[in-house]
Image: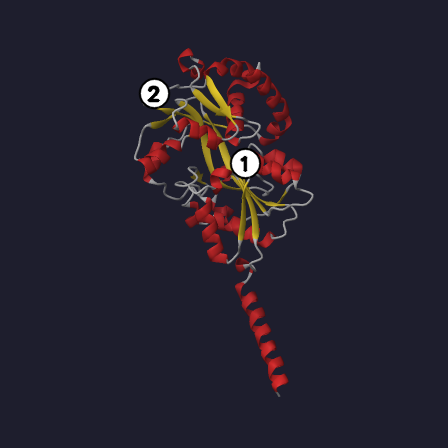
Amino acid sequence: MRKFSAIFFVIIIIGISIFSFSSRGRRSAAPTGLTIYAYDSFVSEWGPGPAVFSAFEKKYNIKLSVISAGDAGQVMQKAIIEKDNPRADLLIGIDNNLLAKALGEDILEPYKSENLEKIPMELLFDNTNKLTPFDYGYFSIIYDSEKISNPPASLNDLLKPEYEDSIILMDPRTSSPGLGFLLWTIAEYGEEFEDYWKKLMPSVLTITDGWDSGYGLFTEGEAPMVLSYTTSPAYHAEYENSERYKTAIFPTGHYMQIEGIGIVKNSKNRKNAELFIDFILEDQIQNIIPLTNWMYPVNTNLELPESFKYAPKPEITLIIDSEKIDRQLINWIEVWTSAVTN
């Protein structure tokens, strides 16, 4: 009798477990884990990562393993190196400028989130749905108003002798903002961009590997201008109550960046990865983006924080087709390298 009772008890427990799992459905996947590669500033304590990751773990009881892999270009490169034996399930940060490279390397799998309906068509930069946009912004030159009273009003103004050793830039080979600025000069000057860079170099104090180190040097006072985003002054207004740092708006336009998130091909935790993409597009998570990642949420119906009045949007948006970038990028990088080293 005791044996029969024990067997009956086990059957009941198994039945309850199966019912519990099936009733939760896909949106409460088993806590098998999820490995994410993301760029440094997303993962940092002041970035959106900690709040987003914590909220996801709490909601779905899925344990995350998050790897800070440098800049967005380094995130992609790490996945390329590992593509025959992928360790990550999700990549955060591959943008419109790196899209064609990521597709060409075949490191991502398509996923069409039900939350895409919240995103304007002009921000859906990948029609294969291998990269889902989660935020966007515009590159700009940020200047220290205590050191510069007459800021530049165009890329051409940056060539002025008064700005000698005044600008901190990032390397396009390792930094997505660095690549964005290179593409900005190509969008504006075409095949003459090499000549522009040669003329620009006297104004450049240094070129750093990534945005974090470059912007850090700027705020430490090493130079009065830095490559960043139009939204950077909003950060200083929000957290430092300061209007010292300002955006130099150029009437000829600013280059646009749309950041994406994608599922790694042959991911071992695909369902959990899908959950995370859906999650990052939910309103409460999109609302985290402005005051942590200092970009615009792709859900454009959300109300922006008051500090974003210090984040002017350019009237003209510049962008280069991703396929053209893929065809020409190696050559452009070679030309750039020659221009900045000779």
Give the residue displayed 46% in from the left and 48% down from the top. Answer: 52
Mark 2 and mark 1 lie on one chain; the one further toward the N terminus is: 1
Residue 326 to residue 166: above or below: below
235 horizontally vs 26: left or right: left
Type of amino acid under label 1: Ala
Q: Which residue is under mark 1?
A: 72
Nearer mark to the viewer, of 2 and 1 = 2
Q: Position of residue 74 (x, y in %)?
A: 57, 35
Given residues 263 and 200, the one toward you in this image is 200
Query: Total of numbered circles in the picture?
Result: 2
Q: Quadrant of residue 250?
A: top left
Q: Which residue is under mark 2?
A: 147
* Residue 228, visible in the rendered structure: no
Outermost residue, top side: 161
Q: In what element is the residue under mark 1? A: helix
Contact (Cβ within 8 Å) of mark 2 with mark 1? no
